[in-house]
Amino acid sequence: MSQTTRYASVLAKIGAERSKLLSEGKLKALTESRSLAELAVQLRDTSYQEQIAKVPLPLTSRKLERAYYENLIETYIKIIKNSPKKARNYLGLYLLRFELEHIKMLMKATYAKLTPDQKSAKIYFSVEDYLKKHAVIEEAVKASNVNQAVHAFKGTEYWLPLNIGLKNYEENASTASFDVYIDKLFYEKLYDSYIGLAKKEKPYALFYVSMENDSFTLLTILRGKALNHEPNWLRLVIPQNYFNLHKATVEALVSAPDFESAFKIVLDSYYAKFFVKGQSPEETIANAGKAFRKAVFQHAKSSAISETFNIGSPLAFMTQKEAEVFNLTVLSLSVSSEMTHENIRNQLLL
């Protein structure tokens, strides 16, 4: 089967879904909304209508955010199901992210003694249906303590990292270690999935995977330095494979005595252009995160037409759709906080 034939089905889906993306003009018009009710009315003629119509009153930014993400997940599933098998394995990571967030949330929520109903309300079960983990997640939801929540995942790929996290939890009564090991598992899977792509597909996925992996590494180390984390803890947290970073650079960052020293090393790295000194380490890190996100979005927009019969096409569209949901979430939060139209626009990814 030719590459053209393999991608024919997903390209048809992408074409249909791309026509539903909100224009920049529409997004700017939405910043004029004076209330969440008005924002919801403005979205009636969009692809989000079905999900928003089901949102129970009174409207809140959190309820609308969930509606946006339900739409995003539904769209992801359509694209992934219609993609060629090897591409499907890689694109599935976009759904896996949600599952990993579910698991991290369940550990925190169980520790905080949330009820099963409260925990269930935070889960996107359409993801779990697609990834075939619905029953496992349901069992974890019912857990009355963290130990039971971890044991719900026995027999899954999450058992080992969660078990290691459980030992740390038992020592210090903090659920933070679960996040560390689950995040690390994701980046291991991200790298392995990229390596598993066909040779001719890799160049089209390289920009996305390198930005995802390397930005996480840099921002995590800088955040760790700002919080005075030990080098050994940072070595535990970050991925072991890099794309445009040298291992020696990463080790120098990890070993740097403080944030300022680490920041100087970053300014000599491949990604120096994404970093501008802010008023505080937190602002510097936040601005870099925005710069990475914007670069990926701009790449997706510019390659949306040129890359067709390869994995670049679904990656470009899924990135654009994700950016749209990010913008709608920002809009909802900003409108509910009564921010000015200008301030809202400055927050958007355009």
Image (cartoon, rainbow, N blue to C red):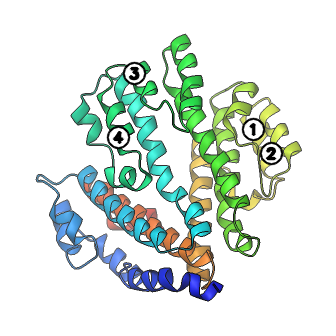
Q: Is residue 161 among what the camera can see?
A: yes
On the image, the x and y values in percent for residue 93 come to: 54, 56
Which residue does the image show at 23% across and 64% down from the upper left? 51
Q: In this view, does 283 lie to the left or right of 56?
A: right
Which residue does the image show at 60% across and 33% down from the upper left? 181
What amino acid is labelled 2 in the image? Answer: Lys
User: Sequence order check: which comes first, mark 4 or mark 2?
Assistant: 4
Query: Which label sits in the foreground, 1 or 4?
Result: 4
Q: In this view, does 262 lie to the left or right of 37?
A: right
Query: Which label sits in the foreground, 3 or 1?
Result: 3
Q: Mark 1 points at which residue?
A: 260
Tag 2 secondary structure: helix
Tag 1 secondary structure: helix
Q: Distance between the residues labelled 4 and 2?
A: 48 Å
On the image, the x and y values in percent for residue 134 come to: 35, 45
What amino acid is labelled 1 in the image? Answer: Glu
Q: How far apart are marks 3 and 2 (CA)?
A: 45 Å
What amino acid is labelled 3 in the image? Answer: Gln
Q: How crowded is mark 4: few (under 14 residues within 10 Å), some or many (20 or more)?
A: few
Q: How far apart are marks 3 and 1 (CA)?
A: 42 Å
Q: How crowded is mark 3: few (under 14 residues within 10 Å), some or many (20 or more)?
A: some
Q: How far apart are marks 1 and 2 (CA)?
A: 6 Å
